[in-house]
Every structure is written in structure tokens, then in C-alpha cells.
Amino acid sequence: MRAVSDLAFLLVKLPYAHWKMERNAIRDNRMKWPHGAIPYVIANTFDHQERSIIARAVEEYHKNTCIRFFPRNKENDFVFITRQEGCFSMIGREGGPQLLSLGDGCMFVGIIIHEFMHAVGFWHEQSRADRDSYVTILWENIQQGQTHNFAKYTDGRLHHLNEPYDYDSIMHYGPYDFTKFRNRPTILPNQRNALIGQRQGFSQTDVRKINKLYQCNTSHRR
């Protein structure tokens, strides 16, 4: 099953929060979660099975990084996991309660990891300034009004943590995201046989980026 794309919902519902975060990883340390600790609340609309899927995604962070998700107590800043239309998340720590939506089609471990990585502080991989060396955007196949989702940003606005472009990133778009024709791609890798848009789990580069952004080391991992 092709991964659900999240950016359209994100830009429509939360434009004030996201146009200021158009980068692969946040540069402003104030938008990082202190000590990598992220309080969360899960809406009561999620059943036991769905909560177990969320828990599996959380466990991937705990196994691979120093990011620690934990149930909110009295923290002012926290992620509110709710069920709205589509899959979307705020980028980094916004202050106060911030939404992370897991709507219809979102209840897969890989998709939840992807949305959590937005909350941790990451934008999509193909937003990088150097992306044209690695992917080709087929503008004519993109849905009307959605071309802004394929914008790229200068290195002054990007922070890719000195890591190479990663086709395998869980933060990369798939080839048919925002297509107006079911069988016509919107984004293709320039490297032959490269695959994009996987939602199985972290790539090795994803893990390195998170650990660099939060200055993790092996002694911090859970």
C-alpha cells in the first residue's frame, strides 16, 4: 500500500505554523524539545489496537535515538495525537498543545514514525536545495494548486546536518504523491533503480540526523 501523503492537509489546516519551518531540519534550538523529551496525549477516539500501533512507532524512537516520548503529566508543551482528516503534524516544538493527526489510512507504524519525525523537527527530504541533482519533478502531472508542495529551499533555510541526500528516508515523498493522473508520477529519482517514499521504518540516515540534531549518543538510547 502506498504511503499516505501528509503535506496537503498540513498546509491547509496549519499554514501559520509551517511556512516558517520550510526546511529539512529545524535550525532554531528553541524549537527543539528539551533533552529530546516529548510529552504526548492520545485522544480517546483511538481504540486499544490503534494505541498499540502508536506504541510500536514510539518504540522505534526509543530503540534508535535518544528521543523519549512519554504520556503528558502537566507539561505545557505537548503533542496531541488526534484523528482528523489525513496525516499531518506540526514541525518541531511550537509551544503549547500541538496537533498530530492520524486520520483514515494513517494507522501504520511507518506513517506514524513519519509524522512523529515532523514533530521531532524534520521537514520532507525533497525540500533540500540540492534535490534537483537527485530527483526530477514532473510539474505537469501535479494536481492544480499543489505545486508549492514541491518547492525547494536554499541552504540558508535548510539544515540537513551534513548528511547526503537520502532516497530511502522515511521523510521522502513517493513517486505519485499529489498526482492528477493515477499512472503518472510527480517525482522520480535520477538514480536508476532507486526507490522513494518508503514507510517501513527509519533509514540509517534518518537515525543519524535525529541523533545529530539532538546530540544523542549511545549511552542515551533506550
Image (spheres, helix red, strand yellow):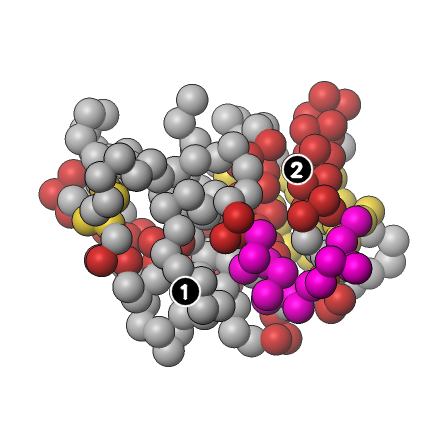
Q: What residue did someone put label 1 on?
A: 22
Please give left or right for residue 22 compared with residue 213 in the image. Answer: left
Q: Residue 146 versus residue 176: which sits nearer the camera?
A: 176
Amino acid type at circle 2 is Ala
Any mark on residue 42, and which? Answer: none
Relative height, residue 161 to residue 221 (above, below): below
Residue at the right extreme, as displayed: 73
Give, as a single range, the part of the protein colored magenta: 207-222
Residue 136 highlighted magenta (yes or no):
no
Q: Considering the numbered disc 2 on the image, is that residue within a helix, a strand or a loop?
A: helix
Q: Nearer the viewer, residue 101 or 51?
A: 51
Q: Residues within 10 Å of mark 2 (few under 14, many from 20)?
A: many
Query: Residue at (57%, 28%) from the top-left corner?
Result: 108
Residue 129 in view of the camera = yes
> Dots 1 and 2: beta carbons under 8 Å?
no
Q: Main secondary structure of the magenta part?
A: helix
- Judged left or right of residue 220, residue 187 is left
Q: Position of residue 139 (x, y in %)?
A: 15, 47
Which residue is label 2 attached to? Answer: 57
217 or 127, nearer to the observer: 217
Between the C-alphas of marks 1 and 2, the distance is: 25 Å
